[in-house]
Each structure stands twice: as C-alpha cells, then as structure tokens.
Image (cartoon, rainbow, N blue to C red):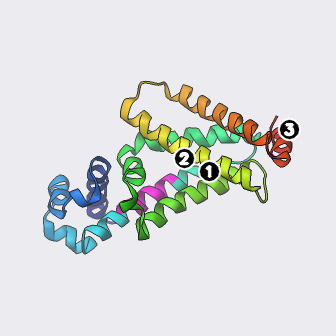
Amino acid sequence: MDRRREELMAAALELFSQRDAEDVSIDDVASAAGASRALVYHYFGGKQELYVAALRSAAEQLESRLRPQDGGRPLDELASGLKRYFDFVEEHAAGFAALLRGGPANRAGEVGEIVDGVRQRLFRMIQKQMRVESPSPLLRITLRSWIASVETAGLDWLEHRDVERATLEKMLVDHMVALLGVAAAHDPSVELLMQDLA
C-alpha cells in the first residue's frame, strides 16, 4: 500500500479515536499528517471514504491477529487469543478506539458492517475454539455478552492503564468460565460443554 495513504489513515485513526467522526474535518486530517487537503481528496474522495478505509484497515489488522493458532485446550486457546487481542489494543490504540468508539450514529451502513464483521469473526473463532458446531440460543447470548465485555475492558484499560494486562487477561478468561457456569444452570448443552472444557 502507498506509504502516504497509510500515513493519512494513521492520522485519521488517531483523530477518530479522540473525537466523533463528524467533529473531524479533512483539514484536521491533512494537518495531522503534514499533508495538503488536496492529497487527502486524491486518495479518499471525502471524509466518509477516509473514515471507512481507516476503520477497515484497523479491523483487518485486528482480525489477522485473531486467527486461531489451534492445538491447545479450549481455555488455553482463549487465553492465547486474548493475549493477541490485547497486543493489538496496546500497539494500535488509536485504531482500536476508533473502531469501537461512538454511538449509534457511527453504527450505520459500512461502518456498522465493519464493526459487526469483527464481532462475528471473533464469535466464530471462540465457537471453533470451544469445538461447538451450532451454539444454543443461551450459549450464543453468553458468548456475545463476553465479547462486549472484552471490548469494554479494552477501552477502559486504554483509558486508565491501572490494571496489569496479564491480570486483566486472566480475569477475562475467568469471566468467560463464570458466564458459562451461569448459562449451564439454564441450559444442559452448556453444562456438557463445561464438562468438556474442564
């Protein structure tokens, strides 16, 4: 990819991680990247195209980190995946924050598809790690709730950094086990899954 285009996207991600997209102008991005307004338009045509390209880039980087490594116990694989997830959070803070930040206005159209796409791939990865072909409704809700917790924990950790990363990652694995335990009390198939995980 063109180096100048990458620099513009990096500058945009940094700005989008700090402010709502509607509060960031093409001039802001050009200034942050040390480029001309014309150059931004040359590569992206407009702010929405830049925003979508920057978020897609962040999503692709995150997803490449999350590809399952395979070969361990499900909870060990989950812990390994979390470590790679938080490696991305730490190394690409702006991209992660921009990807997940914002209210409903930022969740429509292409932007919503990018964010939901990341969540769906994460869901499928966890499902594969747990060796579940087709999750029951309660297991589906449990896994999606956990993914939301991981996203929130990542944003909170970026903002405060007052918890050791290893402690947070371990707590999130324990959180998954606890959520599955609650679901198992209401769903025999999750109870069987818990036995397999143990």
What's under tag 2, amino acid-wise? Ala
Compare residues 132 and 105 and report the one nearer the observer.
105
What residue is shown with label 3? 195
For residue 24, which quarter of the picture?
Answer: bottom left
Mark 1 neighbour density, 10 Å: few (under 14) some (14–19) many (20 or more): some
Residue 118: in magenta span: no
Residue at mark 2 to residue at mark 1: CA–CA distance: 6 Å
| Numbered disc total | 3
Question: Measured along the vertical axis of the image, is residue 110 above or below residue 92?
Answer: below
Q: Where residue 182 appears, x then y in whole percent? A: 73, 37
For residue 52, which quarter of the picture?
Answer: bottom left
Q: Tell which circle, 1 or 3, labels the residue nearer the N-terminal end.
A: 1
Question: Measured along the vertical axis of the image, is residue 169 above or below residue 113?
Answer: above
Indicate which disc residue 148 carries: 2
Q: For the point 64% across and 34% down, which residue is it?
A: 175
Compare residues 56 and 136 and report the one nearer the observer.
136
Quadrant showing the C terminus: top right
What's under tag 1, amino acid-wise? Arg
What residue is shown with label 1? 144
Q: Are marks 2 and 1 in contact (CB under 8 Å)?
A: yes
What's under tag 3, amino acid-wise? Gln
Q: Is residue 29 left or right of residue 1?
A: left
Give the magenta range: 54-62
Q: Tell which circle, 2 or 3, labels the residue nearer the N-terminal end.
A: 2
